[in-house]
Amino acid sequence: MDGGAIAAGIPFFGTLDWDFIAENTPVFIEAAGVTLNISFWGIVFSLLLGLVCAMILELRIPVARQITLAYIEISRGTPLLIQLFLIFFGLPKLGIRWSPELSAIIGLTFLGGSYMCEAIRAGLESVGSIQYESAQVLGMGRLQTMRFIVIPQAISTSLPGIVANVIFLIKESSVVSGIALADLMYQAKDLIGMTYDTAETLLLLVITYAVILLPISIIGTILERRFDYARR
Amino acid sequence: MPGAEILLEPGNITRLLGGLWVTLQIGLISIALSIPLGIIVGMLMTLKNIVVKIIMRIYLDFIRIMPQLVLLYIVFFGLATGTGLNFDGITSSVIVFTLWGAAELGDLVRGSLESIPKSQYESAQVLGFSRFQTFAHVVLPQAVRRLVPPSVNLATRMVKTTSLCMLIGVVEVIRVGQQIIDFYRFQYPTGALWIYGAIFILYFLICFPLSLASRGLEKRFAK
């Protein structure tokens, strides 16, 4: 292997077993698929739940508002790992039985909903009432006001928070190995236990997470600049 | 609800609290170590030196982009093979949470130091303040105002994240919970619900006051 030969000149990299890395790369690609799949659905449902919660809070719907506020505190005040254990091991005792995948997605949604709600609310609140009034004076309907005035400005404020939450949720998904899902962490621990090729496995693990998370972080920075209407 | 009595069996709640204390100690020690280290990291981040800047950037970005569990694996599994140093789960956890806390707190310190406008330094100079006096009487009081609420928030996140120690074999509250559930498997088949429910509530009882404090301070300092 050429890359191996070059890398072998560098201390640390020189001691690595490159055949092991080549051999196990497919394992990590597959495990990355599990991580991404769970994160993707967790993020989609978190956004939906966050949007619903933000609407309830903005429109000040009685009762639902109190429930939402309590949910946000509970979701933010407990670790995902405990939420998952309660969902996956505790709820079956009440007759509610979900697969590990579904439990993980529900857990991520329960956690992510409150974070997304906060990001969305920050956007909606950044649009001052004078903007609504001005749009009305200009003869715009409510829908037009939303489409052309409020949402473009709200997005610019919400987006950095939403992207940060996306990264946060992908990172948090690393604990689903705790309920026996074969994600990246699970495979890494498995390989370390079976082969003792610890350095190689950890390198693969770090690279896989970097490959997933770095582009999102970079896209986030680009989007943040592009949508920066409000501050321009 | 049948089965809740598992929590009343003598010793169970005490054992759970003991397990929680293990994670809390990891959190508290890490927070205590992060404060001085974070202030140093934050000051280093404001330096103009390009080498220091790059090192600090890589440090912060690496800690930020990697899941905490990956960092725990690197220290717990990796350092042992890489250096021959063998850390137990608790030591590994304290190392990781301190590195994480110092990076995040450092960035907060950097932000709050940079938020002080240049005119403040210049005005202090005109008024005859020395550099140390400027820092102690002008910069620090303003920086702390911006620093405290997000730092309490960071502390809450650190306490919450200590639950991950269980995944590198630390015998903490979840592990103790599992032992209790296993022990009473036949006597209380619904034990998992009650034990994990109790742990859930225990974590909330710790984190909720911290989050209230963070918001209270934010309001107080916003004036």
Image: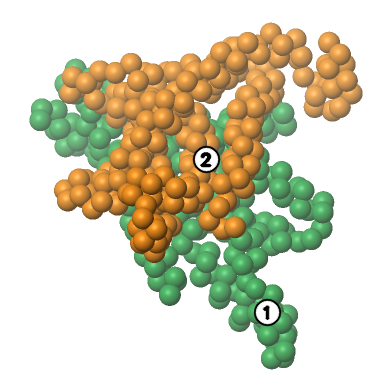
Q: Label 2 lies in what chain?
A: A
- Can residue A210 be seen here? The reply is yes
**Circle 1: is it few (<14), some (14-19), or many (20+) Cα within 10 Å?**
few
Q: SS of the residue at dot 2? A: helix
Tell me the shade of chain B: green
| Residue, disc 1 | B119
Q: Is A156 positioned to the left or the right of B218 in the image?
A: right
**Circle 2: is it few (<14), some (14-19), or many (20+) Cα within 10 Å?**
many
Q: Point out which mark residue A13 bears.
A: none
Which residue lies at the image location 77% right of the left edge and 19% below the top edge? A16
The residue nearer to you, when weighing B125 against B102, is B125
How has the structure been colored for display?
by chain
The residue nearer to you, when weighing B159 against B58, is B58
**Quadrant of the image for the C terminus of chain B?**
bottom left
| Residue, disc 2 | A163
Q: Is A126 positioned to the left or the right of B176 in the image?
A: right
Which residue lies at the image location 76% right of the left edge and 15% below the top edge? A17
User: Residue B121 appears in which quarter of the rendering?
Assistant: bottom right
Q: Is A132 positioned to the left or the right of B111 in the image?
A: left
Q: Position of residue B82 (x, y in %)?
A: 72, 28
Q: How many marks?
A: 2
Q: Is residue B106 above or below residue A15?
A: below
Q: SS of the residue at dot 1? A: helix
Q: Amino acid at mark 1?
A: Ser
Spot the residue most to the bottom.
Answer: B127
Q: Position of residue B109 (x, y in %)?
A: 60, 61
Q: Label 1 lies in what chain?
A: B
Tell me the shade of chain A: orange
Is there CB contact under 8 Å for labels 1 and 2? no
Which residue lies at the image location 72% right of the left edge and 11% below the top edge? A22
Q: Position of residue A130 (x, y in %)?
A: 39, 64
